[in-house]
Amino acid sequence: MPKASNASFSERKMAAMYAKIDVWQARAARLLVILLLCIQPLYLNNERYFRLTYHKWAFFVACVAVVILFVLVIWAYRLTRNPRLIPTDKLQIIDWAVLLFAVVTFASALFSPFRDELNVWIGIEEPQGRYDGAITQLLYVVVFFVISRWYKPNVKDFMFFGIAASLVALVGIFQFYGMDFFTLWPVNVPGFGVDDFFNIPFRTTLGNVNIVATFVCVAILLCGFLFIRLKSKWQPIWLCASALSFWMMDIGGSDSGLVGVAVTMFFAIPFIIESRKYLGRTLILISSWAFVFTLQRLFFDVSIMEVRTFGSLLPFGAVFLALLASGLILTIFGRELDPEAPAKWKLGVILIIAVIAISLVGVEIMGREEAGRRDGFADRIVFEAREVLHGNLRDEMGSGRVYIWRHALSAVPNNPIIGSGPDTFYQAFPQEAQVFMGASFDTAHNEYIQILIGQGILGLLAYLVFLGGVFLTAIRKAFRNPLVMAVLAAFVGYCVQAVFNISLPIVSHMLWVFAGMLVNKRVRDWDITWE
């Protein structure tokens, strides 16, 4: 009996120790989420836009380094207590893909043919300042494993993100109207005007317009689907954050975020029509976008670079009111979702096919006129979409992206397996093709081609298996878990806009944070109360 009693006491002590360590690990993961999603987007030092990427990168590295140190302390404590307390979680296919990506990244940096020209571990430094080298890529992997293993979901974290996203958008919106409260613009910029805004490729607290497009795309979708799917007292914050981010996207000067939002919303139709309440909230969300879209054009229409008359905006106002009224009616009188009801896949697929058909017809009809004769960037997108459907690819399409991609792919055979090293795009790109439309290229403006050049076919395959595994893991829970649905929407939006955008440690870590959440069993099994 005494032996049994001692064994029981030892087991209780061990269980208490496990629980204590688990709490501290969860705190470390949550701290990392808040720092990377909520604090880093707002972080600026006294140099403002000068060396902005460096300071954001340094903040990112410092955050991850602190968490790594914290983890090492926890593991050291575990070892002193009991070696069996060291985690031995079984690795899944996603984990192996991420580890393979890390190994290829390390090898590509180690054997890079450009290691004498560039510090491939850090990446391009000043004056371009990308800092997307091997160290950054490997720290993304650390972020993924910390969050996928230890993060415990807390709705307040997403409330904090909504506030941060709103502040980022507001700073940029006020900048647009000449109210640069934090004096982010260089002091030698002459009198500020709307035209000046489009000549300066830096916005709000994030800098480069492409980076802003990535952030607002993610914010629109994450906060939007939290508003749609999660009944919470923080819903007004998420609605406001999504609307303000949409406003920032409207005046941002880059189309990639718009594409990410549009494609994600399109394929989210089966999730939106699950209940009338969800559909109603979706209409309210879209009405908020219509409201800021209309409000912006009362002051200045960025698509035609002039002020619209009040009468010309009446159709936009009518759309806003119709969406809002319909959304309120469905939200108030719609039925609650039955958690046992089967997902409406068939209806969702039919609607998706119908929207595809209508979109193709619309693109064919509206895209016939030459882009130069049309009103603005939206017309240019439609025109270029029609040309692509007809197989007419021209180098200047996508602001020169077709040219970049075509020449970048021609460089792949030079280092096909593990690439030329992280952040070596400028060196690997054919030098005879370096200048086009008055610009040279240190990035592919496509994250997948960027990885193909830097980490080769093996690195890209590992990355795609990782992304596909995360998506397939999350989609099974998305219908019945509102948090998974919202994070998955942000994840998909990021992946879509990445086809046209650049990777920098200002926002790229967000993908790895979301991936970690979607793989995390605690997030996927989050206990919610059905409406």
Image (cartoon, rainbow, N blue to C red):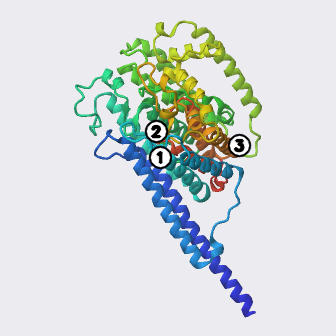
Q: Amino acid at mark 1?
A: Phe
Q: Is residue 11 left or right of residue 35?
A: right
Residue matched to label 1: 161
Q: What residue is drawn where x is 46% and y is 37%? A: 240
> In the structure shown, which secondary structural element does the residue marked by tag 1 occupy?
helix
Could you tell me which quadrant the N terminus lies in? Answer: bottom right
Place of residue 461 in the rendered image (x, y in percent of width and height, measured from the top left) = 67, 40
Residue matched to label 2: 241
Place of residue 203 in the rendered image (x, y in percent of width and height, measured from the top left) = 37, 33
Place of residue 411 in the rendered image (x, y in percent of width and height, measured from the top left) = 58, 29
Alpha carbon separation for disc pair 2 and 1: 9 Å
- Closer-to-camera residue (138/316): 138
Place of residue 469 in the rendered image (x, y in percent of width and height, measured from the top left) = 69, 44
Say which mark, if any, is on residue 453: none
The reply to whether discs 2 and 1 touch (Cβ–Cβ < 8 Å) is yes
Q: Kindly report which numbered mark, 2 or 1, lies closer to the viewer in this rendering.
A: 1
- Residue that sits furthest to the bottom in the current view: 2
**Of marks 2 and 1, which one's residue comes earlier in the chain?**
1
Q: Kindly report which numbered mark, 3 or 1, lies closer to the viewer in this rendering.
A: 3
Q: Is residue 427 left or right of residue 419?
A: left
Question: Neighbour class for label 3 at 10 Å: few (<14), some, many (≥20)?
Answer: few
Residue matched to label 3: 472
The reply to whether discs 3 and 1 touch (Cβ–Cβ < 8 Å) is no
- Closer-to-camera residue (525/273): 525
The reply to whether discs 3 and 2 touch (Cβ–Cβ < 8 Å) is no
> In the structure shown, which secondary structural element does the residue marked by tag 3 occupy?
helix
Q: Kindly report which numbered mark, 3 or 2, lies closer to the viewer in this rendering.
A: 3
| Quadrant of the image occupied by residue 453 | top right
**Of marks 3 and 2, which one's residue comes earlier in the chain?**
2
